Image (cartoon, rainbow, N blue to C red):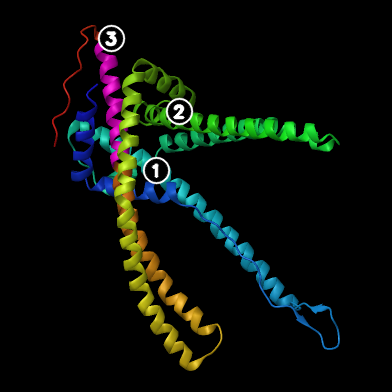
Amino acid sequence: MDHFRILKRAFSITASYRALWVFGILLALTTGANGRISGGPGGDGGSGPGTGTPQWPVISPEVLNALIIAGITVLCLALILAVVFTIARYVAETALIRMVDQHEATGAKLSVRQGFRLGWSRAALRLFLLDFVLGLIFLIVFLLLLAVAGAPLLVWLTDSAALKVLGTVLAAGLGVVLIFAAIVVGIAVSLLLQFWHRAIVLEDRNVNEAVRRGWQLLRQRLGDVLVMGLILFGLGLGWGIVLVPVVFLLLALAAIAGGLPALLAFAVAGLVAQGAVPWIAAVVVGLPIFIVILAIPLAVIGGLAQTFQSSTWTLTYRELLALEAARSNGNGETPPQPAAA
């Protein structure tokens, strides 16, 4: 397998096939999205006159009902967003794989609308089912192993100091081994997933067939696949280092672009109101600008990286299929590859 030819071709596709960028950005946003709802009421406890006991503020039933309704609304919106992000994530991944595959087979470049049609398919649902089942299995196994690793801590129920020390050391050692094993298994599964996903999308396999098919192809050319994985890991590491000054530059630009309007809003609001109102006005005006200036370039950069990585693994999978077909034909030669566009 010519790894550098595949990487060069993936870079060429990423640079020239701009419709892929939309799905790469969607994939970057949905795989990196992490919504967190947090909050806590804060207030100063006062003391009643002539007493030393704190007087807590009383929340009226109307306010309490409004807070409950607001909380339920936020949870419902979060659930809806989670469903939308999940659908977008698997549709985008399916579209990326199929569009690159068709481009290599025919040389055609599809539009974004055509890409969505390719992505909206049973294959996307199968990708979700595969990831969901795998995630559930690994979560259960990890929790069971975590319980086993923590079992030596039960000696703390005894009165023996020596047993407590021994149990703690043993639990800590088992915990380190468990974390290391989880990292290794996570890396291996992330590599296998590239082939399982493409077996589903490119060969129209169901989940069980895709697992067997992906493992079969990986086992046949394990060395080549590991080399490709290491190359992509190294490229990703270097890309991350290059992005560090870019992120700092974007943070500075976002702080300036959002901070100046925020200061203006604070000053204007301070002329007509006091207390928290000027601060709220500053946040409402400045924070959206800060997020937009920071998020849009990072989303585009992440989308390009996702497009390149997905294209590389799709081309790698196609190469493995070609090598398998050549071996089956008995000539040992790789069929001719499509010319670069």
- The magenta span reads 308-328
The residue drawn where x is 25% and y is 19% is 322
Q: Residue furthest top?
A: 330
Q: Provide the secondary structure element on which disc 1 rests.
A: helix
Find out whether residue 311 is within the magenta segment: yes
Label 2 or label 1, whichever lies nearer to me, is 2
The quadrant the N terminus occupies is top left
Q: Please state which amino acid type lies under the numbered disc 3.
A: Ser
Q: Provide the secondary structure element on which disc 2 rests.
A: helix
The residue drawn where x is 60% and y is 35% is 139
The image quadrant of residue 209 is: top left
Numbered badge on residue 248:
none
Q: Position of residue 99 (x, y in %)?
A: 27, 38
The image quadrant of residue 9 is: top left
Residue nearer the viewer, 53 or 271: 53
Q: Give above or below for 163 relative to 299.
A: above
Q: Give above or below for 298 relative to 308.
A: below
Numbered badge on residue 188:
2
Q: Which residue is mark 3?
A: 328
Label 1 or label 3, whichever lies nearer to me, is 3
Numbered badge on residue 91:
1
Q: Earlier in the sequence, mark 3 or mark 2?
A: 2
Q: Please state which amino acid type lies under the numbered disc 2.
A: Ala
Label 2 environment density (alpha carbons within 10 Å; few <14, some 14–19, many ≥20) = few
